[in-house]
Amino acid sequence: MFKRVSPYIGEYKKYTVWAVILMSVGIIANVAPYFFMYQIIAPLTRGEHIEPSFILFRVVAIAVCEIIFSVSYVQGLEFSHISAYNTLKNLRVSLQGKLEKQPLGNIAELGTGRIKKVFTDDIDQVELLLAHAIPEGIANIAIPVIIIVLMFVFDWRLGLLSLVPLVVGMFAMGMMMKSGFEKMNAYYESAAKMNNTIIEYVNGMEVVKVFNKDRDSYKRFGDMVRNYRDFTIDWYKVCWPWMAIYSSVLPCLVLLMLPFGSMMVLGGTIALDRMVLVFCMSFAVGPSVLKALNFAGKFPALDYKIAELEKMMEHPPLKEGTSGFTGENLDVAFKDIHFGYEDVEVLHGVNLTLRQGTTTALVGESGSGKSTLAKLLVHYYDLDSGCITIGGQDITDMSLEALNDQVAFVSQEQFLFNTTLYENILIGKPDATREEVLEAAGRAQCNEFLERLPEGIQTQAGDGGKQLSGGERQRISLARAILKNAPIIVLDEATAFMDPENEEKMNAALDEIIKGKTVLVIAHRLSTIKNADKICVMKEGSCIAADTHDGLIDSCPEYKKLWDASVSASTWKVREA
């Protein structure tokens, strides 16, 4: 585990080394009083007279040892925590950097709950390894080893007797770790599912209440919580008996030494003061070994969590070049595109060209591959085969930054950060002036609702933009795209949340914005894309036809069916009984 984490320690590795040294000094100072106690007790067992000054000196020595222990141990903990928390910072920064390079679809598949757990809970557990388990564990295991060696030097028989409880305790610890590890995968899998379910339950509470799905939703919530409880109890049931054995046996090295040592003293094969010395030394072994093994008991859990971190970091990043945009023009070409989610292919050899300065619309039934194709243009995923080019340059040859400079993506669900609306729009062009931001907001028809807000454009968007309606969030996201002023625009149901009175103004704004741009638009309401330069009809992951509206009406039954359904839906109204 330390080998896995050590690359992230960097320059702070020296703090871990010093922590081990200082803690070892502290433990030596904590063990030394047992020898001073022996020096006081041994003369008494021989009936010798000792001066009060002799006792006072050793009492003072014991006090000095405790002070040394406190100072060195605390300083060692300070160094270990400096190393640990800087390593946690490095881990999180590294993980964040790797996540940024991941396909967005893969991140969505991981789930918010699991990512949150890895970034916070699991990485925090690494602190136990670096701040405590390594420095304290090494110190607490090294000193008992030295003491046991000394026991053998003083009397090999008592040394052997001291090993029996250690062997029993180590065996119990090993069995606990073996049994616990077999249950660990199921335990952590249930924890990840529970976290994702809790977040989904909280986020979907509005829908649950409106549709009276409390019982179904709570049942799933309750099932996941109970499942986690059952796996946890099952895990601990396996571990508890072994834990009880080593916890009770390890601190008691005198279990066998006392009766057998007493018989040896009575038999005259060992001096009483020698046995007292070994006894005093044994009291220093148990607590240190127990503390070290308590850390060892946490290693399987830490190992699992670090493996999960590595698994997340090992996922292949998006194929990305390092060059800027060098395309000859802004024509976009989808060439023999094949793409699937896991083992299921959803796009089958799609070929489509978007000419510079034209608008191309994707239409088709839900699940036909429209949004997937649009997301591939902004490199949401890597292709299984085929390529996408802009001006003849493969998008995987340019950096993500260069690609993002060329393409603006506006979907029906745009995330707003919990900051001001002004800052949310400014994301489109961080170096824009205030006048440019206000102009973009005006062109996106935001002024109508900004004027109603008490703080106008400086109003806080709220968590995920929840202070605004869906249509208002959509217009803020559109203002962001307008400010970005990318030459290629992807609109995925960009007017989905528009109410009827604002839709006309919004469409007029869109018409103005997309002039001279290369546009790929997805819309279920076909009336909004009727005048597109080209309309591509998607069906079951293939492009079955591409032409103008009039051409498709005459030549493509699938498009005519979609058009008739759209016209019918636009005239639908609720009648009074």
Image: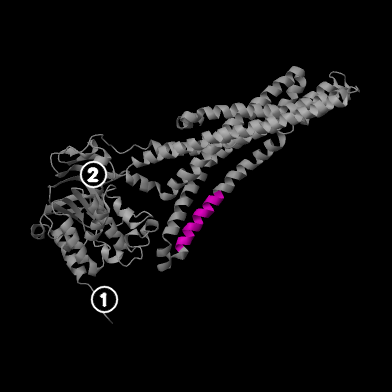
Residue 388 position, x and y percent, is 20, 41
Residue 374 position, x and y percent, is 23, 49
Residue drawn 16% across and 65% down?
564
Q: Is residue 372 in the magenta section?
A: no
Q: Quadrant of residue 53?
A: top right
| Disc 2 from disc 1: Cα separation | 45 Å
| 17 is higher (above) or lower (below) than 431 | above
Residue drawn 49% across and 54% down?
224
Amino acid type assigned to the residue bearing label 1 in the image: Val
Query: Is the stretch drawn in magenta largely helix, strand or loop?
Result: helix
Which residue is the site of mark 2?
405
Residue 489 in the figure: left or right of residue 170: left
Task: Please state, as top left, top right, bottom left or bottom right, where the C terminus lies in the image.
Answer: bottom left
How crowded pointer 2 is (Cα within 10 Å; few <14, some 14-19, many 20+) is rated as: some
How crowded pointer 1 is (Cα within 10 Å; few <14, some 14-19, many 20+) is rated as: few
Residue 99 position, x and y percent, is 37, 41
Q: Which contiguous range is marked in magenta?
A: 216-230
Q: Is residue 225 in the magenta section?
A: yes
Q: How is the image coloured?
A: one colour
Q: Secondary structure at mark 1?
A: loop
Q: Secondary structure at mark 2?
A: helix
Residue 573 in the figure: left or right of residue 27: left
Amino acid type assigned to the residue bearing label 2 in the image: Asp
Q: Specify whether residue 41 is in view.
A: no
Count of marks placed on residues? 2
In the foreground, 567 or 506: 506
Q: Quadrant of residue 332?
A: top left
Residue drawn 41% across and 64% down?
206
Residue drawn 71% across and 34% down?
249
* Numbered tag placed on residue 271 in the rendering: none
| 264 is higher (above) or lower (below) than 332 | above
* Numbered tag placed on residue 574 in the rendering: 1
